[in-house]
Image (spheres, helix red, strand yellow):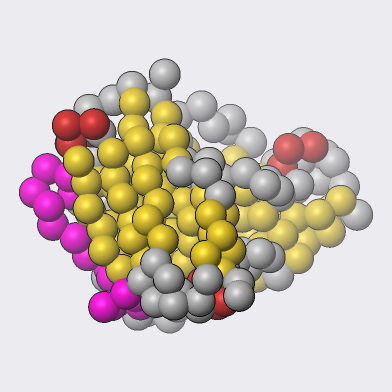
Amino acid sequence: QVQLVQTGAEVKKPGASVKVSCQASGYSFTSYDIIWVRQATGQGLVMMGWMNPNSGNTGDLQNFRHRIALTTDSSISTAYMELFSLTPADTATYYCGRAIRNRLYSDLWGPGTLVTVSS
Amino acid sequence: EVVLTQSPGTLSLSPGDRATLSCRASQSVPNNFLAWYRQTPGQAPRLLIYDASTRATGIPDRFSASGSGTDFTLTINSLEPDDFAVYHCHQYGNSPRTFGQGTRVEVK
């Protein structure tokens, strides 16, 4: 079955970091890019960045520069998004998506991971 | 950064009605690299349209889309219960890729 499975919900304190995983199955992991977007409750989707698991290239990280790290482990078909120095404004649902290479629209999404930042 | 403005913010319609949603870009989208997604409450987005007018796999022909440059439109004919949702446009022609703020289609 072609799917993306994400980490369960997380609760973090301000200043902490969070690492969300996204495990792919049912397709060739290195043949597609992975994009990360987030969505605060009742708000729109916000692009966080993308990564090519084959080359290790990343992009579109401008909005979260210095606070985000995208990595992949192709041996287990898993992508990771780590966000540092969390504030309550980072409370959101984080989605990974399988993105068509050189196009970066997503034809397959993970179920989302709710990250709550609260003291 | 390309800003995508979707209108209207909310569309109130009845089942069986036609919905017309707009997405306007602050600058031209290269190659008409624009996608539309539908998102129902508590669910991840689902790809409907890519490259401005191509339906994704499994999407019925009730969904159609058009546009080029800065103006794009999604039309949904004969709304069904699952169509009452939020619709997002997404441009992937310029870096950084960006999304619109969404249009909610609600039951009138």
In the image shown, does A102 or A9 lie closer to the viewer? A9
Residue A106 drawn in magenta: no
Q: Is residue B86 above or below residue B47?
A: below
> For this view, does A83 lie left or right of residue A73?
right
Residue B16, image quadrant: top right
Residue A88, image quadrant: bottom right
Specify the segment rendered in magenta: A52-67
In the image shown, does A62 or B102 lie closer to the viewer? A62
Asked if residue B14 can be seen in this view, the reply is yes
Q: Residue at x 17, y 45 (%)?
A: A53
Expressed as whole percent of the image width and height from the top left, the position of residue A51 reads 23, 54
Expressed as whole percent of the image width and height from the top left, the position of residue A55 reads 8, 49
Q: Residue at x 52, y 71 (%)?
A: A13
> For this view, does A65 lie left or right of residue B78?
left
SS majority, magenta:
loop
**Which quadrant holds the N terminus of chain A?**
top left
Q: Residue at x 25, y 33 (%)?
A: A77
Q: Is residue A19 above or below residue B1?
A: above
Check the image and name the residue furthest to the top: A1
Q: Residue at x 84, y 59 (%)?
A: B12
Expressed as whole percent of the image width and height from the top left, the position of residue B107 reads 86, 51
Q: Is residue B80 above or below residue B27?
A: above
In the image shown, does B83 or B41 lie closer to the viewer? B41
Expressed as whole percent of the image width and height from the top left, the position of residue B69 reads 38, 69
> For this view, does B40 lie left or right of residue B30?
right
Asked if residue B28 can be seen in this view, the reply is no
In the image shown, does A33 or B79 lie closer to the viewer? A33
Check the image and name the residue furthest to the left: A55
Check the image and name the residue furthest to the right: B108
